[in-house]
Amino acid sequence: MPSITPFLWFTGEAEKAAEFYVSIFPNSKVTDVSRYGEAGPEPAGTAMVVEFELDGQSFMAINAPTGDPAVPAENFSQGKIALFTSCKTQTEVDELWEKLSEGGKQLPCGWVADRYGFAWNIVPEGLRDLIGGDDERSERAMRAMLQMSKLDIDELQRVYNA
């Protein structure tokens, strides 16, 4: 079975975005950068494809050629893919939330749109156990989560146990 690698599209910021993501997650690195040559379609030396790993998961990013009629003018990456991260502790949730939302937008229910327009769902481990049931406790936790922006596992646990 072939492996699957998420491939993120950018218009000029692929290398900068990869470096940003690598700076946030442990065990992460840029593994390769291919650059446009004199034949273009972007200026020579501009990053074409950036390969990187986030905590061992491989990703690729491309700077799509600007002005290419095959490439939509709008930020086509937004809304096309969302990235999910499960955090072991509230401290991890807090740190990722702050770093990924810097220059971006904080959204409801643990969602952040980063400065490049990609959506991230930053979730504490165990959330599914709290909100996934069909009992009154899970309903309380779900209602509490729907009122939150950044998820607070202690508060969700408190509401669940109330």
Image (tube, rainbow, N blue to C red):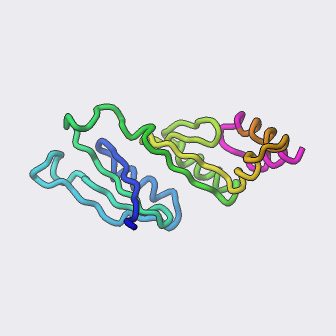
Examine the rendering and report whether any part of residue 23 can be seen.
yes
Q: Quadrant of the N terminus?
A: bottom left
Residue 99 is situated, as x and y percent measured from the top left of the image, at 54, 49
Residue at 36% of width from left, 53% of height from top?
7
Q: Quadrant of the C terminus?
A: top right
Q: Is 156 located above or below residue 69 in the figure?
A: below
Q: Is residue 79 magenta?
A: no
Quarter occupied by residue 89: bottom right
Residue at 65% of width from left, 39% of height from top?
109
Q: Is residue 160 magenta?
A: yes
Residue at 47% of width from left, 61% of height from top?
54
Residue at 28% of width from left, 61% of height from top?
33
Which residue is the extreme one toward the left? Answer: 39
Closer to the camera in the image, 17 or 135: 135
Residue 6 is situated, as x and y percent measured from the top left of the image, at 40, 54
Q: Which residues are magenta?
A: 146-162
Q: Is residue 150 left or right of residue 59?
A: right
How many numbered marks are there? 0
Residue 56 is situated, as x and y percent measured from the top left of the image, at 48, 67
Q: Is residue 65 left or right of residue 32?
A: left
Which residue is the extreme one toward the top? Answer: 74
Closer to the camera in the image, 114 or 134: 134
Q: Is residue 98 left or right of residue 16?
A: right
